[in-house]
Image (cartoon, helix red, strand yellow):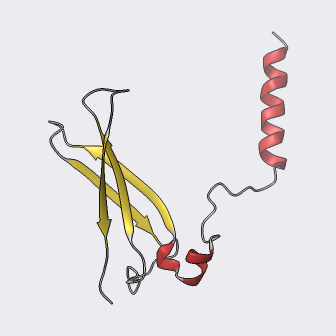
Amino acid sequence: MKVLPKAVLLAFFCSIFSFSSFAADHVDSPAAINDPAADLTDVYAWMNSDATKLNLILNVTTAATVDSQFSDAVQYVFHVNSSTAFGETATETLIICTFDA
């Protein structure tokens, strides 16, 4: 099995000599450039253990500090679809979050 050592060696050299890359692309839209609080970074959603509640988290501002605030000029919106079974007709619910200045 001489193939395995060659594959491991190739993977090792590729990892050492690889060029850096960027996975997430944030602050590239005009809205995010003008208002960093409009830069949506991540969305998390999960059901509680008995499936009666949906938990939603929306992260904004890649370089948030303790002084960062949500923007009063942005509507943060969750689009939630619900159906009785996968592939069935879904009902859409919009959860719109706004903040005062």
As drawn, the residue found furthest toward the top would be 1
Taking 18 as reference, is 101 above or below it?
below
Image quadrant of residue 28?
bottom right
User: For the C terminus, which image quadrant?
Assistant: bottom left
Residue found at x 62% / y 71% = 29
Taking 68 as reference, is 25 above or below it?
above
Taking 53 as reference, is 67 above or below it?
below
As drawn, the residue found furthest toward the bottom would be 101
In-image side of 75 versus 49 (left or right): right
Taking 40 as reference, is 20 above or below it?
above
User: For the N terminus, which image quadrant?
Assistant: top right
For the residue pair 62 and 89, the one nearer the viewer reads as 89
Image quadrant of residue 47?
top left
The image shows a total of numbered marks equal to: 0
In-image side of 67 versus 20 (left or right): left
Residue found at x 28% / y 34% = 83
For the residue pair 60 and 17, the one nearer the viewer reads as 60
Find residue 26 and report its horizontal and vertical position in percent: 60, 66
In-image side of 55 versus 71 (left or right): left
Find residue 70 and report its horizontal and vertical position in percent: 38, 79
Find residue 6 and report its horizontal and vertical position in percent: 85, 23
Residue found at x 40% / y 81% = 71
Image quadrant of residue 66?
bottom left
Find residue 36 and report its horizontal and vertical position in percent: 52, 79
